[in-house]
Image: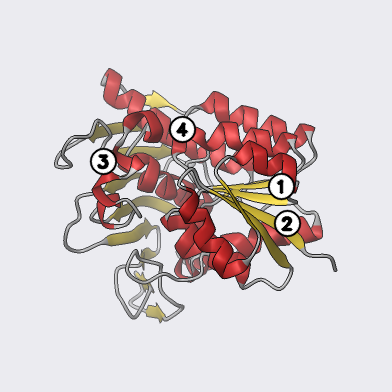
């Protein structure tokens, strides 16, 4: 089988910890190009994996003509770069949030369709073993219907994670557009949609900047969600969990409760009303300090190699983005916002 020729656009932390090592570990991949305006960052990966370094992605697309690209750049660039890559005939894996407006997301989906290439969004939460197990438990029917939920993602912020620390693009509104909600909240809106096999119908959000200095992007959000099924719950995203990083979800159901990511050893705990308790050791959820394989790159390559719809399609990414955009609209208007 001929190898998939992959180019990585954007050589910051997400490339360093996730995309590049996972491509490099895949037997059917040849890394052919790395792109970053700070050319030394691209050259760093070329020295490790071969290929060619570029400062400009359009030049790279024209010269290299890769089979596939990862778009690992600031949020505001996701759409334009993904569309240009699709128009150049490349399959696209784009980091989340896939875009910064619904119109952009729609245009990305259309570009992929028009050019007959795959578009996948890097929602890695779906692939984490505790979340896969939790969905299996839900689908078994043992818990009955989900009634209420709480899903949360908080850590100390990109200043602790990004390659540029406090100087990161994450804090520059023209590039980031949104803060903790775009970085972490969209993970949770995607997770709850996927895990419950349900869509969000209504959102209320408090979104603000509480502690990060010299930035106009949000560092905290607390949202209320109503699902189409009628289930209601909360979604929390925070860049100010300076102690006690949290990436947990709890589902209260007709027959009991399921706790996901609340215990370091027993990643999924099912407590039923009849008194039985099941504890599942299924592997950890990634944290900034301890990276696990995301599963995203393998799923993207699987869709290319088998010519099947990606595990997280552009439509999935768009639906999960809409929830976040509605939370911002709720904050701006003081109203409940219908997701349609």
In 3D space, how far apart are the residues under numbered discs 2 and 4 (Cα atoms)? 26 Å
- Percent position (x, y) of residue 202? 41, 31
In 3D space, how far apart are the residues under numbered discs 3 and 1 (Cα atoms)? 35 Å
- Percent position (x, y) of residue 302? 72, 62
Decide: few, some or many residues near mark 1? Use Cα within 10 Å; few <14, some 14-19, many ≥20: many
- Does label 3 or label 2 sit earlier along the sequence? 3
Viewer-proximal residue among 135 and 140: 135
Q: Residue at x 27, y 44 (%)?
A: 167
Q: Is residue 101 left or right of residue 298?
A: left
- Percent position (x, y) of residue 319? 53, 37
Of the two numbered discs 3 and 2 in the rendering, the one whose residue sits closer to the viewer: 2
Of the two numbered discs 3 and 1 in the rendering, the one whose residue sits closer to the viewer: 1
Tell me the SS state at disc 2: helix
In 3D space, how far apart are the residues under numbered discs 1 and 2 (Cα atoms)? 10 Å
- Does label 4 or label 1 sit earlier along the sequence? 4
In 3D space, how far apart are the residues under numbered discs 3 and 2 (Cα atoms)? 35 Å
Where is mark 1, residue-wise?
Answer: 91
Where is mark 3, residue-wise?
Answer: 222
Decide: few, some or many residues near mark 2? Use Cα within 10 Å; few <14, some 14-19, many ≥20: some
Q: Is residue 131 above or below residue 282?
A: above
Q: Residue at x 24, y 47 (%)?
A: 166
- Does label 1 or label 2 sit earlier along the sequence? 1
- Percent position (x, y) of residue 128? 48, 66
Where is mark 4, residue-wise?
Answer: 76
Q: Residue at x 42, y 44 (%)?
A: 186
Q: Is residue 311 left or right of residue 124?
A: right
Tell me the SS state at disc 1: strand
- Does label 3 or label 4 sit earlier along the sequence? 4
Tell me the SS state at disc 4: helix
Tell me the SS state at disc 3: strand
Where is mark 2, residue-wise?
Answer: 303
């Amino acid at each position: 089988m001929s190898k998939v020729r992959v180019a990585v656009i954007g050589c910051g932390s997400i490339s360093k910890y996730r995309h590049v090592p996972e491509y490099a570990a895949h037997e059917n991949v040849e890394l052919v190009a790395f792109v970053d305006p700070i050319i030394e960052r691209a050259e760093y990966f070329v020295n490790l994996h071969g290929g060619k370094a570029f400062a400009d992605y359009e030049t790279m697309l024209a010269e290299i003509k890769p089979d596939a690209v990862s778009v690992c750049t600031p949020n505001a660039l996701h759409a334009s770069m993904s569309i240009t890559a699709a128009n150049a005939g490349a399959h696209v894996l784009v980091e989340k949030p896939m875009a910064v407006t619904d119109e952009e997301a729609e245009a990305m989906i259309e570009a992929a369709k028009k050019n007959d290439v795959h578009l996948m969004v890097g929602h890695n939460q779906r692939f984490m073993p505790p979340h896969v197990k939790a969905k299996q438990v839900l689908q078994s029917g043992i818990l009955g219907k989900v009634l209420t939920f709480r899903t949360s993602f908080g850590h100390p912020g990109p200043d602790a994670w990004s390659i540029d620390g406090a100087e990161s693009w994450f804090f520059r509104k023209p590039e980031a557009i949104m803060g903790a909600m775009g970085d972490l909240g969209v993970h949770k809106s995607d997770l709850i949609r996927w895990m419950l096999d349900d869509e969000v119908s209504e959102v209320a959000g408090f979104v603000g900047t509480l502690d990060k200095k010299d930035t106009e992007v949000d560092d905290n959000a607390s949202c209320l969600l109503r699902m189409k099924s009628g289930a209601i719950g909360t979604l929390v995203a925070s860049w100010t969990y300076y102690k006690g990083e949290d990436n947990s979800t709890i589902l209260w159901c007709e027959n009991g409760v399921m706790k996901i990511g609340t215990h370091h050893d027993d990643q999924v705990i099912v407590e039923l009303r009849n008194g039985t308790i099941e504890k599942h050791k299924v592997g950890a959820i990634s944290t900034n300090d301890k990276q696990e394989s995301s599963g995203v790159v393998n799923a993207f390559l699987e869709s290319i190699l088998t010519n099947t719809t990606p595990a997280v399609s552009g439509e999935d990414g768009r639906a999960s983005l809409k929830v976040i955009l509605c939370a911002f609209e709720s904050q701006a208007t003081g109203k409940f916002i219908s997701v349609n």
